[in-house]
Amino acid sequence: MPKQNCWEFKQCGREKENEEGNGTCPAVTEAAADGVNSGTNGGRICWAVAGTYCDGSVQGTYAQKVTSCLMCEFYMRVKGEEGYQFKRIHFKF
């Protein structure tokens, strides 16, 4: 099974501007994180990207959202898939 980015796993519809006028999620456009945890842009390190859209609302900074992200099913999946190469944060952005 191929590794999914957060927008594929969550099926949030925020991988591009949608019909409701909701903008693209910052995880989709965070090019500095491309390849981290085998993802496209910030797609597999979304917990470290400020202002992501999750569960229907805009999330805050890493410090504001990290507690809820650590309990997220997607976070746990990425951590398990990446094993010892897992990166919780990425210091380039």
Image: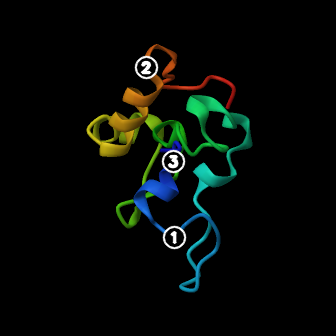
Furthest-right residue in view? Answer: 31
Q: How crowded is mark 1: few (under 14 residues within 10 Å), some or many (20 or more)?
A: some
Q: What is the C-alpha distance between the residues marked 3 and 1?
A: 14 Å
The x, y position of residue 17, in whole percent, is 64, 74
Q: Which label sits on residue 83?
A: 2
The x, y position of residue 50, in whole percent, is 53, 45
Q: Which label sits on residue 13?
A: 1
**In the rendered structure, which amino acid carries the disc numbered 2?**
Gly
Tell me the SS state at disc 3: loop
Q: Is residue 83 above or below residue 16?
A: above
Q: Which mark is first along the chain, 1 or 2?
A: 1
Q: Residue at horizontal 48%, vertical 50%? A: 6
**In the rendered structure, which amino acid carries the disc numbered 1?**
Gly
Left or right: residue 25 versus residue 83 is right
Q: Is residue 63 visible?
A: yes
Q: Is residue 57 above or below residue 67?
A: below
**In the rendered structure, which amino acid carries the disc numbered 3?**
Gln
The x, y position of residue 65, in whole percent, is 37, 42
Q: What is the C-alpha distance between the residues marked 2 and 3?
A: 15 Å
Q: Residue at horizontal 47%, vertical 25%? A: 82
**Depth order, front residue of 93/9:** 9
Circle 3 residue: 4
**Depth order, front residue of 65/35:** 35
Q: Residues within 10 Å of mark 3 (few under 14, many from 20)?
A: some
Q: Which mark is first along the chain, 1 or 3?
A: 3
**Mark whose residue sits in front, 2 or 1:** 2
